[in-house]
Image (cartoon, helix red, strand yellow):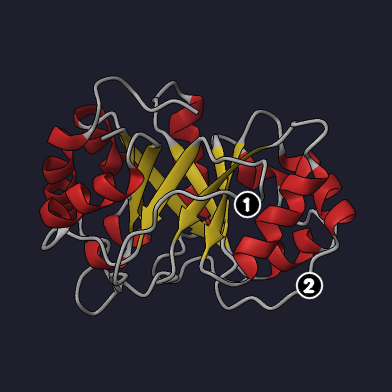
Amino acid sequence: MNLDRVTVTGADDSIGRPENLLDLTREFPFVEWGILVHAKGAGEPRFPSDNWISDLQRLVKGGHKMPLSLHVCGRWVRDLLIGNMTIPESLLFGFDRVQLNFHAENTSVDPPRFYEAMHQLRRGRQFIFQIDGNKGNAHLESLMLEDATEGNLDLVPLFDISGGAGVLPSAWPVPDSAGDEVDYRYYGYAGGLGPENLAEQIPLIGKAAGETRIWIDMETRVRSEDDEQFDLAKVRQCLEIAKPFVRQGEPSM
């Protein structure tokens, strides 16, 4: 199995200050914190406040090594698809990866303008496309076709038919391609993963992925049952379960 990263998504103000993530980051260097954002969601469960994100960025600026991915939802994603980069520049600092969540989005894409807008975001970042069997697949393929001659964008898919609902798929997919001449170098798996099933599901994901380099992502099942609290105890449990399956060394882009 070629698992090198475990993304835990949804840390928010419910844990108190972002410093409370540091001990887990040091103990489990393969963890990546997925931070959810959208234009109207700051301060809601799963969507941390602007001040909380600023405090997190200050930790990074102060020298704390914290792998971070920015998971963008809603209007900011819809704007990108038609060529408008409206994500605040200040929000991007410290995030090496940017995930575009397309679940339940029906916006059409303008491929050339989308490509130009993504170039404004690039700056060495990797872009994760939420693949749910619908729009995400088409958007990723359109962008890869635009980028086929230059290869400037680092694009990777995340299989996530659950869309944050915490539902396991009936089967984990085998890594595929966006077109006849495109193969993914890195592939993410998400949907319904949590402390109660991770030990069983990681080997199943590994079997499906084969030798492909992969990461896994979890969100709903590391929260309290009422969805109000990001549960650091559940997060620790998941990271302890995942640790024996993760290859040695830190995740690479």
> Tag 2's secondary structure?
loop
Task: Identify which residue, 149 or 63, lies in the foreground.
Answer: 149
The N terminus appears in which quarter of the rendering?
Answer: top left
Q: Residue furthest right?
A: 112
CB of mark 1 within 8 Å of CB of mark 2? no
**Residue shown at 51% from the left, 68% from the top:** 132
**Residue 139 percent location from the top left of the image:** 70, 60
Task: Tell me if residue 42 comes above or below residue 175 in the rendering.
Answer: below
Image position of 44 with respect to 62: above or below = below
Residue that label 1 marks: 178
Between residues 156 and 67, which one lies in front from this camera angle? Answer: 156
Pointer 2 residue: 108
Q: x, y percentage for residue 19?
A: 31, 39
Give left or right: position of 239 versus 52. left
Q: Is residue 18 above or below residue 60?
A: below
71 or 182, nearer to the observer: 182
- Report x, y in % for residue 58: 49, 34
- Precedes in sequence: disc 1 or disc 2: 2
Inspect the image, locate mark 2, and give the three-letter code of the amino acid beneath it: Ser
Side (left or right) of 128 relative to 192 = right
Asked if residue 75 can be seen in this view, the reply is yes
Residue 7 in sight here:
no
The image shows residue 17, relative to residue 31, as above or below, that is below
Secondary structure beneath disc 1?
loop
Q: Report crowding for label 1: few under 14, some 14 to 19, many 20 or more residues within 10 A (C-alpha).
A: some
Q: Nearer the viewer, mark 1 or mark 2?
A: 1
User: Which residue lies at the image location 61% right of the left edge and 64% below the top edge?
Assistant: 136
| In this rendering, position of residue 117 left or right of residue 72 | right
Residue kind at label 1, given as amino acid type: Ala
Count the marks: how many? 2
Task: State left or right for residue 144 relative to residue 12.
Answer: right
**Residue visible at 52% across and 45% down?**
54
